[in-house]
Image (spheres, grey):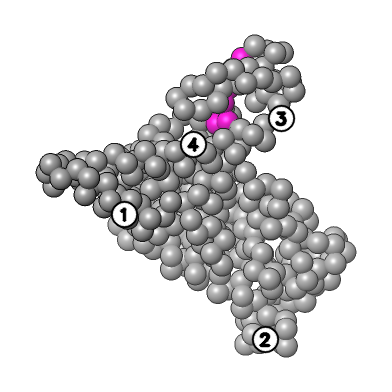
Amino acid sequence: MNNQQFSTVFDGLMRCLPHLSGQQGEALRTLLERNGSLVECLAIIEERGARLRQCPHCAATRIYKHGMSAGLQRYLCLACRKSFNALTGTPLAHLRLREKWLPYLQCMIDSQTVRASAAATGIHRNTSFRWRHRFLEDAKRQRELPLQGIVEADETYRLESQKGSRHLTRPARRRGGHASRRGITSEHDCILVARDRAGATVDFVTGRGPVTKKQLFACLPPVLAPDVLLVTDGAAAYPAFASAEGIMHEAINVSAGVRVRGAIHVQNVNRYHSLFKTWLTRFNGVASRYLPNYLGWLYGRDDNRISTPASFLRASLRINEKSLRDV
Ligand SMILES: [Zn+2]
């Protein structure tokens, strides 16, 4: 039921209950909305349950339905005698308040801050932060692979941030955050992005400082179709990597002022970099260790891949895995 249908039904119901005060009417609306949201959330979780073929504890396949618990089907494994449900072993296993999951995911689709999402859904801001990263943990891995055709690859750099860490591994920076040296240094996180012309994109936070050939070997071969044309800027690591892997490669000499040679350019991937950096500013300082989650979040936003709370929850539960593979 969408919002408009709900309002129609609710208004009809309210006409039958003329003695309710405005406040009672609002309380009833909240109750019904929450219940509707909970029912929808549980139904999506059970889509995952229906696809379970083995025990999450011991991988045995003799599993049986074994009653209900907190609105979810429980299963029993005949091999290890442990019980489980559709969420066992997932990042969402111990999250409570399921009636608020879908409203919370709507806040994420709207790129709301931790605080705004907490206020909108009536949860604590610490819970809001924890939920954000739990929902992203598996959702971020789902990409259309392999990348095909012309694949642009390029890095972007961002001053590393230890926000939220109790123990800094370097002296604290003054507010505003500037590197102590110019250029790309070991104070910068390197984000490697590869994107094909259909928009399929993968990203890697490769570590501090410029990307190395070794890192390219670790990241790119598993995500590239064998016959791609890799297009990069002039960074030295790429030609060595491409020739060793037998990948066709074209480099654009950006530092010499050449930006485009026909179809040979890295402008799509560079646009994606700036999209990411611009979008990230709304979150007021993201710690380095969470960058992969935000990159995955952006990928879901890009091209409207994830545009409803239900599809976000399905991605978090890897329900659509058949068409999408892990990075
Ligand atoms: Zn088992």
Between disc 4 and disc 1, whose residue precedes? 1
Which of the 4 image quadrants contains residue 67? Answer: top right
Spatial separation of the CA atoms under disc 4 and disc 2: 50 Å
Q: Residue 42 bears which disc, if any?
A: 4
What amino acid type should be assigned to the residue bearing mark 4?
Leu
Q: Residue furthest right?
A: 246
Q: Is residue 261 visible?
A: yes
In the image, residue 195 lies at what x, y percent? 66, 67
The span picked out in magenta is 82-87
What amino acid type should be assigned to the residue bearing mark 3?
Arg
Q: Which residue is mark 1?
A: 7
Identify the residue shown where x is 40% and y is 59%. Answer: 110
Between disc 2 and disc 3, whose residue precedes? 3
Between disc 4 and disc 3, whose residue precedes? 4
Between disc 4 and disc 2, whose residue precedes? 4
Which secondary structure, mark 3? loop
